[in-house]
Image (cartoon, rainbow, N blue to C red):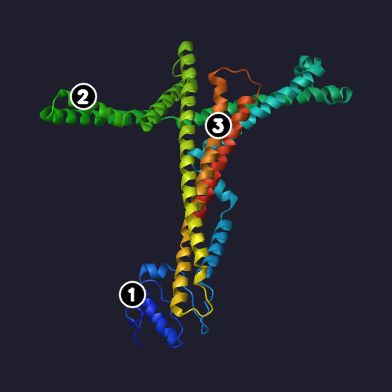
Amino acid sequence: MDTSLYTGFYTSQRLVDEFNMLQDNAPIALHAKGTINSNTGYEASDDENTRDASVIDDNGVLEKPVSEELSTSTDAHEALRSTVVKNIDILHHIFGTLGGKDRLAKILKYVLDLLKLFVGHGRAKITKWDPQVLQYYSKVLAQLNLRLILKHPITILKIITVAGLRNFEARASLISTNLSLFRQIMRFGGTPFRLVSLCQKIGITMQKITAGKQTSINIVGSQSSNGHSLSVINKLWLNEGSLADFIDLYYGIMDELMLLHKFKVWHHEGTYQWVAKHECLSWYYDIILGLKKNWVSLQDLNKAQLELEIQIQVKKRALELSSRLHGKAASPIKQQLLQDLHNGSSNSSHTLDRIREIEQQRKTVILDLIRLLFDFAADTTDVFHLKTPPGTYAVLSLASGLTGFVKLWRNAKSELTNRV
């Protein structure tokens, strides 16, 4: 049969070959990507192989697209991958990172602080109920014997309870202090590298200004040279990245000075008060900048997600309008065109994957925003010396630690799942 009559309908040689096979009642052969068709001698292109292939039976009816089977198997594979990752593996992965250790130490520290607060309230109630307990408990514990226990069981129980609670408070306070020290040690050591980076940036700025001055003097004059210097400074220094670097350096210096004071490297009460104040301020500025960055990032992700959803809606509308192509006596060419339209719509699976990816990123950014809001509220009490109920700072910091841990958990689970 002469195929030149049909070449104007569709440019793909593969379509013409399949039409000839339909006329001869031969099954349509589906070729893998990059394979050669034995009948035509041409190699299947990437565009043709990426389409979802379907098979037309002898009655001219489209059978189930291969893409549905592939998507079903892919979903099953993804479900299998998600069940392989165990919680203990995720926890081990988190604990193997500095960020994970910091979050776990933060959670444990403020849990101990809250327990210590509750235990202190309980011990205070017992001593108010019976003030003589604290007066004699040390003497009684030193001379404790069976006869004394049988003679005064209630009093001895109170004394032992108060002693146990006081012992727990002392140990919890020691562990909490050491955990705070541990977190500071993990942050220690970054200031020299930040200073080196700052000096390198200053050197780059001076080089560009010098080169610009030489060029401007040779061409125009000194006024243009000054304008070039200002433009270089504006470009390299007056931006959000430079502000973040300065705040990071500011906080790093104050935090490391506080750690050196804890190690008794330096002693000066006035300097200590000044450093403690600026440590809170530097962390406050860092939190505010982090909130701004995450808010802008969230708005960008929302915009990107909306654009992709609009694309999907447009494709769905196009498919609805294409329903008029359906007919009872549809020719093979018409069926192939309709199938190509549906195959083109199946490319929206990539768009759906991108939407899911953006949704995961949105959840991560939202968790980071919540964490920073808790940190902001906690540090506000220190910066402005607000009078708050006991345990307010610990509750806010614990909420921040838990939110950050959830973020790390999600990221670690996603990373381990992709490795499977």
- Looking at the image, residue 197 sits to the left or right of residue 127; the answer is left
> Which residue is depicted at the point 56% across and 35% down?
370
Residue under numbered circle 1: 43
Quick check: marks 2 and 3 in contact, CB under 8 Å? no
Q: Earlier in the sequence, mark 2 or mark 3?
A: 2
Residue at 48% x, 26% y is 283
Q: Residues within 10 Å of mark 2 (few under 14, many from 20)?
A: some
**Picture coordinates of residue 256, whole percent (x, y):** 44, 25
Q: Element under label 1?
A: loop
Q: Position of residue 302 (x, y in %)?
A: 49, 44
Check the image and report above or below for 283 versus 39: above
As measured in the structure, the alpha-carbon distance from the residue carrying label 3 to the one carrying label 1 is 58 Å
Q: Nearer the viewer, residue 323 or 251?
A: 323
Q: Which image quarter holds the N terminus?
A: bottom left
Q: Which residue is mark 3?
A: 373
Q: Is residue 245 left or right of residue 159?
A: left
Tell me the tag on residue 226.
Answer: 2
Amino acid tagged 1: Glu
Q: Is residue 212 positioned above or below 350 on the image?
A: above
Q: Residues within 10 Å of mark 3 (few under 14, many from 20)?
A: some
Residue 200 visible in the current orientation: yes
Front: mark 2 or 1: 2
Say which element carries label 3: helix
- Judge whether 72 appears above or below 92 on screen: below
Q: In which image quadrant can residue 228 be found?
A: top left
